[in-house]
Amino acid sequence: MDLEVTGVSGPGRLDVAVRKEGDGVVVALVGELDHGTADMAREALEAEISAGHTLLVVDCADLSFCDSTGLNVLLATRLRLQESGGEIRLAAMRSAVARVFEITGADTVFTVHPTVDRALGVAER
């Protein structure tokens, strides 16, 4: 498993790590996805799409917060992937972040899996 840290935004704000897993790419978001950190997440996701990857799994296990700007980054990524026949899947979402998706109705347009492995379609390790 190759791990590439693509960015860090201030202490405790957001870390983005990207790794190839089988047929997909896992983008782990650690910290807060909001107005101040959204560009870093957007750039990492866009880079993977531009590289031709069609399955992106966003690992939300350590994502502690997501506001409307962060949600819009994920929605835009979903649309861009759909245009090219790809897919974004969310995994291991914390309840506080899941609540934002429920309130906005975004939970109806994303596939959310309990683990990264399930999102990738592989057996649990």
Image (spheres, rainbow, N blue to C red):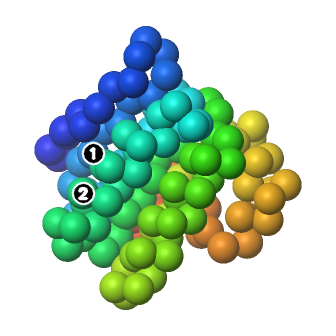
User: Given the image, on which type of amino acid does mark 1 rest?
Assistant: Val
Residue 97 image offset from top left, x and y in percent: 69, 42
Q: Nearer the viewer, residue 92 or 103?
A: 103
**On screen, residue 114 above or below 97:** below
Give the residue displayed 17% in from the left and 66% down from the top. 51
**x and y, in percent, of residue 111 in the image:** 59, 69
Q: Which residue is mark 1?
A: 18
The label shown at residue 47 is 2
Occupied quadrant, residue 33: top right
The residue that appears at 31% across and 59% down in the rendered structure is: 46
Q: Position of residue 118 (x, y in %)?
A: 48, 61
Mark 1 packing: few (<14 Cα in 10 Å), some, or many (20+)?
many
Classify 96 as above or below 80.
above
Q: Is residue 62 visible?
A: no
Q: Quadrant of residue 50?
A: bottom left
- The amino acid type found where label 2 is placed reads Ala
- Dot 2 or dot 1: first in sequence order is 1
Q: In the image, residue 37 lies at what x, y percent?
A: 48, 34
Relative to 125, say whether 3 is above or below: above
The residues bearing labels 2 and 1 have C-alpha atoms spaced at a distance of 10 Å
Identify the residue at horizontal 66%, vertical 73% (top origin).
109
**As drawn, is 70 to the left or to the right of 107?**
left
Q: Is there a contact, CB below 8 Å, between mark 2 and mark 1? A: yes
The answer to whether residue 73 of the structure is visible from this angle is yes
